[in-house]
Amino acid sequence: MVVDQLREPLSDEELDRLFQAFADPTRRDIVRRVTVGEYSVSGLAALYAMSFAAVQKHVAVLERASLVSKEKRGREQIVRANHDGLQKVRRLLDEYEVIWRQRTERIADLLAETAAPPRGSMQPGTTNQHGRRQQHTNQQAGEQQN
Amino acid sequence: MVVDQLREPLSDEELDRLFQAFADPTRRDIVRRVTVGEYSVSGLAALYAMSFAAVQKHVAVLERASLVSKEKRGREQIVRANHDGLQKVRRLLDEYEVIWRQRTERIADLLAETAAPPRGSMQPGTTNQHGRRQQHTNQQAGEQQN
DNA sequence: CTATTCTACAACCAAATGGTTGTAGATCAG
DNA sequence: CTGATCTACAACCATTTGGTTGTAGAATAG
């Protein structure tokens, strides 16, 4: 099936390329344009105050990030938006949003706990010393990812 | 009110800084970490195989993008995640998603139109020549934004 | 008080980025 | 066929980026 490499774990390099691609106003504009209509590379180049080669490079960056793809038609290359790329970035940011919600929940729980008398919770190691000053030094020095 | 500069239009520079900030695995990891717990800058630095100054710079990038903020506590600087920044990026990508859905809708409409005999639609300028080959050259050479 | 820790910042460096011009091959129009 | 258009790509350049080391000040620990 073609579907469902959208569910696969996003690699660091993939995410680097995606965010990097979005980190430029011309490229963001290109993505918007080719999502609503079809453009050749020179059709795009006509829109911006820069050389054809510069726009060509921007399209190449978007293509490596899998945000657009090109299709040859006669002597022109038609640039099309690629939905997968967009969805991948959105998926990652959704994960960050989930982390936020979990954190908010956790804080609400702590507040409820200290407001009401401690019931089933408050076993030795489950919650830290009344909210302030977590570990914040030397938890596993393993590298990061994602 | 403090609320609702979230509804204001995102500036190009703001978006550049946000996406750029996300375009690095170490910085993405820092954002995740400081969303779940509190870290000083040196607490963060202990996690990665790079110098303190390097991590300090990463935090500075995140701070300029308003993805985190620092608060001085004693001799350490506590780094905290900033929800606004995340929401801004998500908002922009949601806009892109909307464009996609509109496009999909539009295509579905066109298909329905050509399948069924033309009813109330098909006035002179409303739809283009049976789908293929749009303008794609020289529509207003105005600069881009967003 | 003294030593240590945490931070900030400058100076430097290599590599990546975003732009340019120029050259050359394909394809299309007349 | 000839000329114009569209594309690809190389070479070059200035600036930014992501890292380093080193120095110095402020706050804490003993």
Image (spheres, coloured by chain):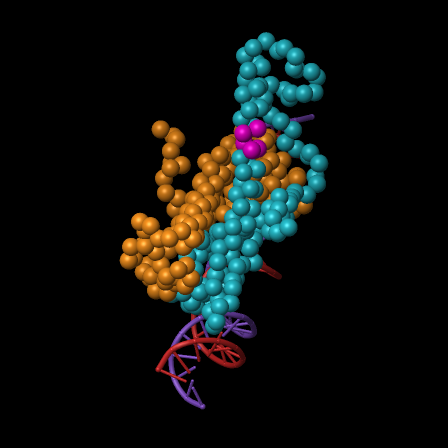
Chain colours: A cyan, B orange, C red, D purple
* Residue at x-position 60% and y-position 35%: B33
* Residue at x-position 57% and y-position 19%: A109
* Residue at x-position 57% and y-position 33%: A99
Dividing the picture into quadrants, the one containing residue A110 is top right
Q: Nearer the viewer, residue B34 or C11?
A: B34
Q: Nearer the viewer, residue B114 or A111?
A: B114
Prevailing secondary structure of the magenta residues: helix
Q: Is residue A117 visible?
A: yes
Tell me, yes or no, whether the highlighted magenta stretch contains residue B114: no
Q: Is residue C3 left or right of residue A29?
A: right
Q: Is residue A120 left or right of residue B125?
A: right
Where is residue B15? Give x, y as percent.
44, 47
Count of marks, rendered view: 0
Q: Nearer the viewer, residue A3 or D28?
A: A3
Where is residue A19? Give x, y as percent.
53, 49
Q: Nearer the viewer, residue C12 or B59?
A: B59
Q: Is residue A55 above or below residue D26?
A: below
State which region is magenta.
A98-102
* Residue at x-position 71% and y-position 36%: A140
Q: Is residue D26 above or below residue B117?
A: above
Where is residue A77? Give x, y as percent.
48, 66
Q: Is residue B14 visible?
A: no
Dividing the picture into quadrants, the one containing residue B34 is top right
Q: Is residue A87 left or right of residue B131?
A: right
